Image (cartoon, helix red, strand yellow):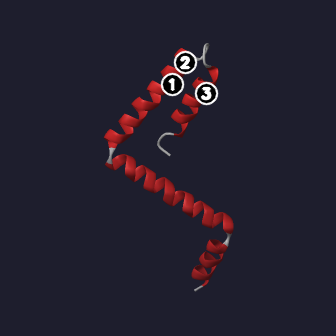
Amino acid sequence: MHTAFALYHLYESGRVRHALKTLALETRTLLGALLSPNQVIADVKAMRAMQLEADRIEATQPARAAVLRHRAACMGR
């Protein structure tokens, strides 16, 4: 009974609850990637294309290049 009580108090801690939620989210993301590898590959290709386009236009359109880099960084979230 002591163990269950201790676990309950640990779960009531905000840090532990946050850690468990983060673990669940990471697990879900990993399973999603394992179940759909073609989607991951497509996302990586799109991110790479955005990065290359950003590199190409950096000198003439720095603001647009920054937007492309930001969008590439946010893909897959």
Which quarter of the figure has residue 8? bottom right
Which residue in the structure is indicated by mark 3?
66
Residue 3, quarter of the rendered image? bottom right
Tell me: 49 left or right of 6: left
Above/below status of 63 relative to 31: above
Task: Name the foreground residue: 62 vs 26.
Answer: 62
Alpha-carbon neighbours of circle 2 within 10 Å: few (<14), some, or many (≥20)? some
Residue 10, above or below 35: below
Q: Give the Cα distance between marks 1 and 3.
A: 10 Å
Q: Which mark is residue 64?
A: none
Disc 2 marks a residue whose amino acid type is: Asp
Residue 51: assigned label: 1
Q: Position of residue 40 (x, y in %)?
A: 38, 39
Name the residue nearer the viewer: 16 or 4.
Answer: 16
Crowding near pointer 1: few (<14 within 10 Å), some, many (20+)?
A: some
Q: Are marks 2 and 3 in contact (CB under 8 Å)?
A: no
Q: Nearer the viewer, mark 1 or mark 3?
A: 3
Q: Please state the horizontal and vertical placement of residue 12, each as a whole percent of the image.
A: 65, 74
Q: Find residue 29 and report its horizontal and vertical position in percent.
A: 44, 51
Lower position in the chain sequence, tag 2 or tag 3: 2
- Determine the CA span between mark 1 and mark 2: 6 Å
**What residue would you read off at disc 2?**
55
Q: Are marks 1 and 2 in contact (CB under 8 Å)?
A: yes
Disc 1 secondary structure class: helix
Amino acid of disc 1: Gln
